[in-house]
Amino acid sequence: MMQKRIDELKIKISEAQIGGGQKRIDSQHSKSKLTARERIQLLLDNGSFEELGMLVIHRTTDFGMDEQLFYGDGVVTGYGSIHSRLVYVYAQDFTVFGGSLSETHAEKICKIMDLALKNGAPIIGLNDSGGARIQEGVRSLGGYADIFYRNVKASGVVPQLSAIMGPCAGGAVYSPAMTDFILMVEHSSYMFVTGPNVVKTVTNEEVTAEDLGGAHAHASKSGVTQLTAKNDVDALIQLRKLLAYLPQNCEEKAPSLPYTLKDETVLNLGDHIPNSPNQPYEIKDIISKICDPDSFYEIHSEYAENIVVGFARMEGQSVGIVANQPMVLAGCLDIDSSRKAARFVRFCDCFNIPIVTFVDVPGFLPGTAQEYGGIIKHGAKLLYAYAECTVPKVTVITRKAYGGAYDVMSSKHLRGDVNFAWPNAEIAVMGAKGAVEIIFREDKGDPAKLAAREAEYKARFANPFVAGSRGYIDDVIQPHETRKRICRSLAMLKDKKLENPWRKHGNIPL
Ligand code: HXC
């Protein structure tokens, strides 16, 4: 009896292994896409995958579905390890009903999400699906909602990562949308709520799937995806890389790699700052020199490039970096950059990742497009995020910190723990020219007098010493000692404890 059942089991396993069959696997490969099982093998540590629910089949009988049964029902689910740490994973199998989501398919995903929550480990979803299983109707919609609810329940409890590795359309987009990070594969994935045909019917616009919802469109235009990958293998390598910076759950500290202390002086760092305050420079050169070598991993690099966000390590400790980028829009804050940075700050706060902020901000971007677009509400998101967050916050003003943007960018007033400024920093309400034109309006017709007033204003206010004298800046430091001072600050703040007052939840201006 036992042997008979073992033989039966072996047949079922081998049937499950080939999903929708060799022909469909070949078709998947011909689109430069790996299968669900191949993806999981590459994602997880070698041999660590434990599959759950391999023998699940759907329960639909309509439209001849009772004659089309595939083990696993279009999704491979289970757990394994990445960098020897537990993760839960699901990978939709496009070779079975186009990876479409049935009631049972959804149940499998929900099962591993529940396990991830109970056991405090990240959830990774590899999406490749034609959407709701058309033969199932509302049962499939219910399945989606069951997943959405779990995405919300897991939000801020365990990291949730989504890779889009094929189609992801209609309401199906809302599960990835609620996860912490989305990564899209270039040319073989797309995401949209309504596809090109519906767009054409409703708006008469002609657009391809790639232009409407491909990786590039979402990385640079909508900002929906924070990461893009050249192909499936690159995508899976990047997911592994990203996870290395993250703790397992909200109760753990951010990971720290062993680090041997060296001479932490960074020579000639100040040479990156041009003599003219109006000349741009590449903030990423400064970030890379201050963080551990090759540790800076930029997130959302193609979107709102006037602000830079990403993960890095300082003496092995995982940190989040936020920095104004003087190369784009002079580093101004605008709607997109405020939203981008606010979401990143909140992610770091959820998962106990200290934040290092580099400030060079001339203010908020002026204009009707910004005002009509709601910069008041969107700018407030970043302010709110910094004020609310309780992780260690170290801030360095490398040049300008003007106006409201000074307050927003992790200032002392928003509970910045250690705030430094370089000697060339200008911390003031506004630039000297604008200030003088307002307060000395009566000298308007006298350029020489105005110039003298401007020089006087600059000398008095465009420096870090006024803020230093008030304690808004903890110390004015020289560029070469920045890395050492940030590392010491982070070490000092290692066991920081800070809690916000009890409430049901805050009301961030969404
Ligand atoms: C059942 C599906 C399916 C689906 C694809 N298939 N989508 N089966 N339900 N939603 C099946 C196909 O019949 C085919 O089966 C196999 O998957 C591969 O599909 P192809 O069309 O051959 O592949 P391709 O040419 O690559 O096109 C992929 C596709 C297309 C663009 C995704 O299949 C498609 O448009 N599918 C329908 C998409 C859709 O309208 N979904 C419902 C959206 S509404 P065989 O047997 O030939 O291999 C929705 C609401 C969610 O999702 C709401 C949540 C709140």
Image: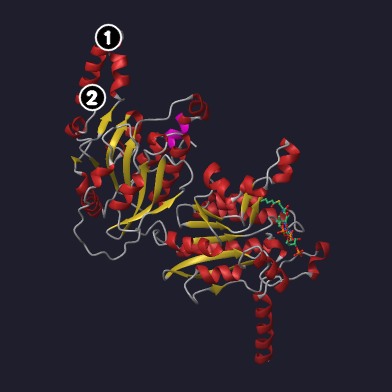
> How packed is label 1: few (under 14 Cα within 10 Å), some, or many (20 or more)?
few
Q: Position of residue 499 (x, y in %)?
A: 33, 46
> How packed is label 2: few (under 14 Cα within 10 Å), some, or many (20 or more)?
some
Instruction: Answer left or right for 429 relative to 467.
Output: right
Q: Is residue 272 above or below residue 460?
A: below
What's the distance in space between the residues labelled 2 and 1, CA to CA? 18 Å
Write the start and end of the magenta stretch as one range. Answer: 376-381
Evaluate whether residue 74 shows in this view: no
Please identify the quarter of the rendering in which residue 324 is found. top left
Disc number lying in front (2 or 1): 1
| Residue type of the residue flagged with mark 1 | Asp
- Dot 2 beta carbon under 8 Å from ligand 1: no
Question: According to the image, label 1 marks what residue?
Answer: 446
- Badge 1 marks a residue whose secondary structure is loop
Q: Position of residue 254 (x, y in %)?
A: 35, 58
| Residue type of the residue flagged with mark 2 | Lys
Closer to the camera in the image, 189 or 411: 189
Q: Are marks 2 and 1 in contact (CB under 8 Å)?
A: no
Question: According to the image, label 2 marks what residue?
Answer: 458
Residue at coordinates 76% horizontally, 39% vertically from top-left?
201
Closer to the camera in the image, 163 or 60: 163
Residue at coordinates 66% horizontally, 92% vertically from top-left?
3
Q: Is residue 400 above or below residue 247?
A: above
Magenta span dominant secondary structure = helix
Q: Position of residue 94 (x, y in %)?
A: 67, 64
